[in-house]
Image (cartoon, rainbow, N blue to C red):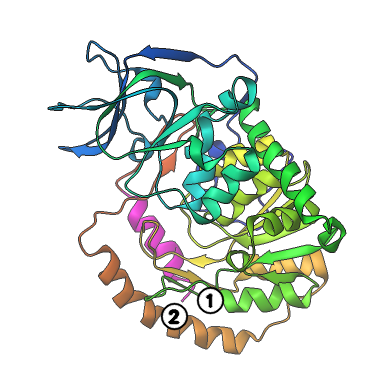
Amino acid sequence: MDLYNYKYMDELFLENYKKMEQLDLCTEDNLTVEEVIEGTILPYRVVGNSKKAGVVNQNGEYVALSAFEALSEVDSWGGSYQIESAEYLDETVLYFGRFWKHWGHFLMDMVSRLWWIIENDMNIKIAYDAQEDIQGVYWEFLRLLGVSKNQMVRVENPTRFAKVIVPECAHKPGISCNVRYKKIFDIVAQKALQEFKDYDKYRDKSIYFTRMQMKRRIPFEVGERDFERLFSRQGFVVVAPEKYSLVEQIAMIKGAKRVACLSGTLPHNMIFAQDGAELIVVRKTNKPNYRQVSVNQLRKLKVTNIDAHISLKAVGPGGPFVLDINKNVEAYFKDCYGKCDYSKVLQWFKRKIRLLWYVPIYILRNRKMDRQVPLFDGKVFSTTVTAKSELFSYYIKRI
């Protein structure tokens, strides 16, 4: 796709990455809705090796539409399990699905069924499966959408309702993304800008969203400070988004002409951006983030990916991640800003020190895991026998 710039990415597994980003996901197809009389909501449970949750009808049959589908089986869930009893509430509710505190999953997975309330009934009760109330930034999002607190019904145990309305997910990560999904965020952003009022404060700014101010007991990524400095020297405003209200975060993203950030959850926030905005993703791992593909396509983002990492081993979301000013980073800054202002000698020493950090942290976080290198062939994720050794040999040369 012309929207992507792959010039600053490592050649290792690049073709697999291109196949993922070039999936054609956007659709305007009609979405299905099922009304389940005397439906029972089953909260999330792990049964054996399966992740179960969703809705069953009055005959105990699972409602397939209540499952959550994603390109990766790891992120999918659905299915019924045996229950002894269920509380009864004489209410008609919309099935929201699972909720847990993770901003990226909230944006990409959890709000996907809320297109229905926009088109049908903004005042309907909304039943969500969770062990805690929706609060903080998550509640701020729902408030901006037009949902009130007395609409929300938390389901902790199997609960039967007079009627459960189960809309199809408008976003199935890596599978499809309906235009109705985009509308959810358009409404939230419009309301946020009405509340913020000082939209010009961030108009045409270049913003670097940092993770450096997040509170973590054990760091799982090192080297971002160098990137804060590099982008700051080129006029980017360095922002820790968690320090601001969602309203102001949306104003920043909506007003910015370009946004730079590390790969992970932060790029998902571009779902609030103006169509055609520029996104620079500093990749901290070779692992693909297939959820971002829908965001890039819906907003027609101009995306530059920069491989800025040393990835000796396959890791999960907990890392560790080593960020490095390498040839990709140097080429990007020289091409776009005329120079890459850093000390090669100092960076060489930092690289060695970060390796000493990497080994014990990797053992601590991954000692019980058989981590694989996920490769996308255009249809599914898979692994190869040699992928791990290829990964190690490629990046060990950078140390």
> Does the magenta run of residues contain 393?
yes
Q: Nearer the viewer, residue 115 or 20?
A: 115
Q: Can residue 109 be seen in this view?
A: no
Residue 342 shown left or right of residue 147 in the figure? right
Task: Decide: few, some or many residues near mark 2? Use Cα within 10 Å; few <14, some 14-19, many ≥20.
Answer: some
Q: What element carries label 2?
A: helix
Q: What residue type is labelled 2?
A: Arg
Q: In which quarter of the image is residue 327?
A: bottom right
Q: Residue 306's quadrant in the figure?
A: bottom right
Q: Which of marks 1 and 2 is in front?
A: 1
Q: Is residue 395 magenta?
A: yes
Residue depicted at x 52% and y 37%: 111
Would you name the residue on which mark 2 appears?
Answer: 354
Where residue 4 appears, as percent x and y from the top left, is: 69, 45
Q: In this view, does 123 lie to the left or right of 202?
A: left
Residue 245 circle label: none
Which residue corresponds to mark 1? Answer: 223
Residue furthest left in the image:
84
Q: Is the magenta stretch mostly helix, strand or loop?
A: helix
Q: Give the magenta-colored segment's residue range.
A: 386-399
C-beta proximity under 8 Å, tags 1 and 2? yes
Q: In this orientation, does residue 205 appear?
A: yes
As displayed, is residue 356 above or below residue 331? below
Residue type beneath disc 1 = Gly
| Secondary structure category for the residue under label 1 | loop
Graded by Cα atoms within 10 Å as few (under 14), some (14 to 19) or many (20 or more), the crowding at tag 1 reads many
Question: Viewer-proximal residue, 180 or 365?
Answer: 180
Foreground of the two, 132 or 73: 132
